[in-house]
Amino acid sequence: MANFEVRIVTFIILLSTLCFSCNNETKEEAEDDRPNIILIFMDDLGYGDLECYGHPLIKTPHLNRMANEGIRFTSFYAPASVCTPSRAGVLTGKYPVRNAPFNFAPTSKNGLPLSEVTIASVLKEVGYQTAAIGKWHLGHQPEYLPTARGFDSFYGLPYSNDMILPWCPWLTEDDKLYMYRDTSTIREIGMEQNELTIDYTNEAISFIKEYKDGPFFLYLAHSMPHLPISASQQFQGTSKAGSYGDVIESVDWTIGELLKTLEEEGIKKNTLIVFTSDNGPWHELPERMLAGGVERWHTGSAGMLRGAKGTTYEGGFRVPAIMYWPGTIPPQQMNSELVTAIDLFPTFAKLGGGALPEGLEIDGQNLLALMTEGKTSPRNTFFYCKEKTLEAVRYKEWKLRYTESEGPELYNLMEDPSEMYNRADEQSELVKELLQKLQEFAEQTAADFYVSEIGG
């Protein structure tokens, strides 16, 4: 009897061990099914710069394909209308005014506050291989570089491609522009930047091939089409839209190379690609930029939108955005819902099984239901800041912009996306309602906000 009981206990232990093993295998299989995530973040790409967003001359067949087979957004907003805060917003899921990084240069000693948690850190914590390729611009001291902010590797430039002489006249000959590998400089880039886009893409392809078994998170932040623009020799003079068109068409070609790599490695259906821009195009160039071969027309188009980079009109914040995930995101979608790049943080975290950081204010909203089920956007409000100054709010179809110089400007963005017709006088109650939203947000974030006679 005792031997029989021993055999029974042994059998139960063995069965439990097998069940535990099966559960672990199921968990591992589930983790293997988590998608790879590629975020392609362009620099100064305008709302009207792509063929699938209405450009009459620039040809972008690969981005057209992604748009046709995925979602093309028409009301997608960058976190800011200039480079550094926009990058802080997309990587932390916050309005940039909360962590206040505005611009970093070769002379800077600081960067994105070390108290901030990036989406790379969240995904790395749950087993993702993470890489940053391209422009960083969130601090170049070792403690601020990507490898200290959740990325396993970094290959790229620490800041904008114009941060050398002659474009930044306050710098000296000793302030060189170097390519980095992790925390080390590996070569000088200087003014010859023709191969930069191709170089980043080749690095991205190598990363994809090495970690094709996934899951991986690739942050591919192209330096182009930020001034000074340049394209590889094979694309120079090929676009009907001049040098700027050459640059955009070369970027589109690299998108095709990435798509081909995903197909060849058999991971196309397990990879989400998000393509967007950090802000709108650079117009009314400062005199310092008109040197070293830069021309006024080397900039992009905001399409029908008013304003450009550095402004809180739509042309500064509203940017192209395409999401592509064959077999998961239904094809042929044009989405006019209000969405922002800040929303990518909680969306990526959810996809990867990561937890949002405790004790930190996250402004982003999870977009998975919108992406995969066609649900409405979880957000109806977006705030526009110019550095630390709060200047505008969009609530559903209405946008109130309020500045010292212009006073109240109220636009219906569904009827008037070009912000041509100020309706503040006829909608005084709505102005007061939106002004209240601005005041409350300014109080929450310590943003500067100038109020005079309206509700002040």
Image: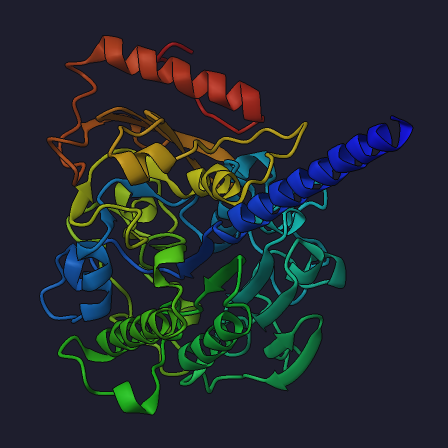
Judge whether 114 appears above or below 241 on screen: above
User: In the rendered image, which quarter contains the C terminus?
Assistant: top left
Judge whether 107 appears above or below 198 on screen: above
Q: Is residue 141 left or right of residue 197?
A: right
Q: Residue furthest right?
A: 2
- Give the total of numbered labels: 0
Q: Quadrant of residue 347?
A: top left
Q: Quadrant of residue 286?
A: bottom left
| Chosen colour scheme | rainbow
Q: Is residue 101 visible?
A: no
In the image, 408 versus 103, the foreground residue is: 103
In the image, 37 versus 147, the foreground residue is: 37
Q: Residue at x 28, y 15 (%)?
A: 431
Q: Residue at x 47, y 48 (%)?
A: 86
In the image, 108 versus 359, the foreground residue is: 359
In the image, 32 versus 431, the foreground residue is: 32
Residue 378, position as x, y percentages in the image: 35, 26
Q: Residue at x 39, y 49 (%)?
A: 310
Residue 31, position as x, y percentages in the image: 55, 48
Residue 208, position as x, y percentages in the image: 49, 70
Q: Is residue 333 visible?
A: yes
Judge whether 238 appears above or below 66 on screen: below
